């Protein structure tokens, strides 16, 4: 399953894959080394290759001078950075 972890120290969300029965409540933050806490999210076993709507979302969301969004992680980051999704 794909789980999301939020680090308050650096305000970053990280995605990690663990077994459904074996996931930690906290992980070491990849960005700052702090502790990232598991947050409530829509767990999924899908990969970025499973996102059939990504090309159309990328066209709508990205501006001409921006690099296209190519992954679920980039999509979520874009939404957070542009205040289109709630911050944790």
Image (cartoon, helix red, strand yellow):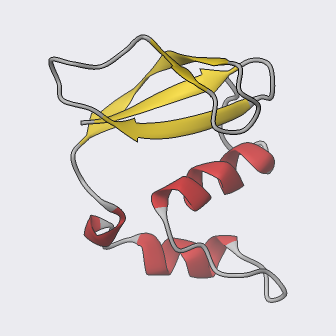
Q: Is residue 2 above or below residue 50?
A: above
Q: Is residue 50 above or below residue 60?
A: above
Q: Residue furthest bottom?
A: 64
- Picture coordinates of residue 48 (x, y %)? 36, 64
- Picture coordinates of residue 37 (x, y %)? 55, 15
Q: Nearer the viewer, residue 51 or 10?
A: 10
Q: Residue furthest right?
A: 65
- Picture coordinates of residue 20 (x, y %)? 17, 24
Q: Is residue 87 left or right of residue 2?
A: right
In the rendered image, the quadrant that contains the C terminus is: top right
- Picture coordinates of residue 29 (x, y %)? 63, 29
Q: Is residue 38 above or below residue 13?
A: above
Q: Nearer the viewer, residue 30 or 82?
A: 30
Task: Using the rendered view, name the quadrant where residue 64 is placed.
Answer: bottom right
Q: Nearer the viewer, residue 53 or 1?
A: 1
How many badges with numbers are in the image? Answer: 0
Q: Residue furthest top?
A: 25
User: At 71% from the left edge and 75% from the top edge, which residue is drawn?
Assistant: 62
User: At 57% from the left edge and 75% from the top edge, which residue is drawn?
Assistant: 58
Q: Is residue 62 above or below residue 10?
A: below
Q: Is residue 73 left or right of residue 11?
A: left
Q: Is residue 20 left or right of residue 77?
A: left
In the rendered image, the quadrant that contains the N terminus is: top left
Task: Using the rendered view, name the quadrant where residue 14 is placed.
Answer: top right
User: At 53% from the left edge and 54% from the top edge, which residue is drawn?
Assistant: 73
């Amino acid at each position: 399953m794909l789980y999301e972890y939020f680090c308050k120290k650096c305000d970053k969300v990280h995605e990690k894959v663990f077994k459904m029965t074996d996931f930690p409540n906290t992980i070491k933050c990849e960005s700052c080394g702090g502790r990232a806490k598991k947050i409530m999210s829509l767990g999924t076993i899908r990969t970025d290759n499973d996102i059939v709507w990504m090309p159309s979302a990328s066209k709508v969301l990205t501006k001409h001078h921006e690099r296209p969004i190519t992954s679920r992680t980039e999509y979520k980051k874009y939404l957070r950075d542009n205040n289109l999704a709630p911050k944790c």
